[in-house]
Image (tube, rainbow, N blue to C red):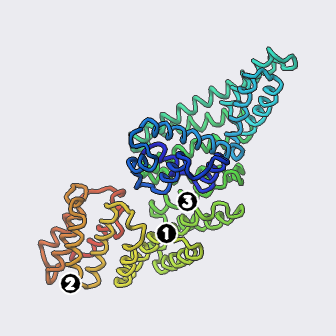
Amino acid sequence: MDILNQIIEKLNKEEARNLKLFYGNQAYTGRKDLVLFNYIRNSGNNFKEEKALKKLHYQNSKNSYYRLKNRLIEDIGDSLLLLHTHKSEQLELFQFIELYQFYRSRNQYKVCLFYLRKAERLALAIENYELLDIVYSGLIKLSAELADVEPVNYIKKRESNLLILASLRELDDILAILAHRLKISQNFGELDRSMLRKLQLKVEEITKRTTSGYGRNLSSRIYNALSQVFLQQHNYVALEKLVKDNYRSFERNKWFDKSNHEQKLQMLTYAGNALFKNHKNKESLEYSVMLGNEIEQYGKSHYEKYLFFYYNLQVLNYAVLDPPKGLQALDQFEREMRKKENTYYDFFIYLNRAALLYDLGKYNQALKNLVRLYVSDGYLKADAAFKLRIEVSELIITFESGEMDTLLYRVEQVRKSFGKLLEKKEFKRDREVIQLIKDMQATPNYLRDEKIQKRIKAILKEKYSPVEEDVEVIKYRTWLNQKLRK
């Protein structure tokens, strides 16, 4: 996707509206940059450059079209900075430094000093030692122009700041090496634990030289980097320990507050999901309850975003511990979404309800929910491989329901719809399960049929990762184990 399309796609309503305010009286409907902006925003993935050229009457002037795109990128950037600078302390700090540079070019040194002092206070407050180095350098240069700026004082401050910066860079280097090692090695060995300990000691060392809150910022940086690595690896044992240790540390040091409340919610979500993956369902449920309580805090500032994760943990764990309670949680979530007139989560609701009803032996109701799933917007946009696993699960449920005529018809439909996908070697197990379902349907007693029993055992012996099993709605291994002759 073109960079301009990516920028426009991610703009929210306020940001899009602000661009038109940025253009002011010039924002008439015939402006070519706004014509292009509106076309890209409205067309989404259906954007066609040829159609854009036609709308702009640029069929014979592609250079003009590219100049227009570049200008629009610049205008959106300026508009976003105007909108967001005073909403972000980091952006505000950059603005103070830019204003210093601007007034220095005009030789307005008193104004330069005004902005540099504001920048120094803000950089110290938010602990941005990289930009603080630039601020001190500017103040030292300014001492040559203003007699009341004492350079020795700022030289000492810059030297102290450089010690902190050197340690921070060393920490970033260790963190980068550790993150890279974990990504390529796919495990968490003794060397990695040693490097993690080295990181923690470096945090303690830097914290002694800086303000009292800096340990929180450094710990957050390390936690965020490592948690993403463990997630990519699907290393849920390491993720569980990392999240729980950091959560306890933040609680003990009283580091959680309104400013990092979302990180607290994310930690609870990660802990709950890691515990579920590690088959610690009761403990995972406890974390879901903690998450449910925390999303109510600070005026429900992150309620909408984390409500789904709360219900997801409830449904996942009750599916194992108490399926009827899982259905109750789904019904409650559906009522919440209907009140908000939000159908975005229909896919999640129908799919999980079908799986829970299957677990309870309510096969016809499970199939009805799958039918509702198939006509939802979420299903139309779903990945083809995931759709295949859903429809194989439908075949399993149909087999259990005893609707054999429907089963034969649906087997052929699934084969036809996913023919190219089923030819690939990574979908060998899906292909075998589909054929097995068909053959079991055609056999009077598959429990006594030696060939079928042998094929079930062969599929069960095949090695595949837990990651591959995660995408199965109804776990093939669990279902096939039930079909073995006892």
For label 3, the residue is: 269
Q: Residue furthest right?
A: 148
Give amino acid for label 1.
Tyr
**Cβ–Cβ under 8 Å for marks 3 and 2:** no
Of callouts 1 and 2, which one flags the residue occurring earlier in the amino acid sequence? Answer: 1
**Cβ–Cβ under 8 Å for marks 1 and 2:** no
Using the image as rendered, state which of residue 339 and residue 210 is in the foreground. 339
Give amino acid for label 2.
Asp
For label 1, the residue is: 345
Disc 3 versus disc 2: nearer the observer: 2
Task: Locate residue 285: give its quadrant.
Answer: bottom right
Of callouts 3 and 1, which one flags the residue occurring earlier in the amino acid sequence? Answer: 3
Task: Locate residue 350: give its quadrant.
Answer: bottom left
**How far is disc 3 from disc 1 in space, using C-alphas?**
18 Å
Using the image as rendered, state which of residue 400 and residue 8 is in the foreground. 8
Q: Judging from the image, what secondary structure is the residue with disc 3 in?
A: helix
Q: Dot 1, crowdedness within 10 Å: few (<14), some or many (≥20)?
A: some
Of callouts 3 and 2, which one flags the residue occurring earlier in the amino acid sequence? Answer: 3
**How far is disc 1 from disc 2 in space, using C-alphas?**
32 Å
Residue 89 shown left or right of residue 171 in the figure: right
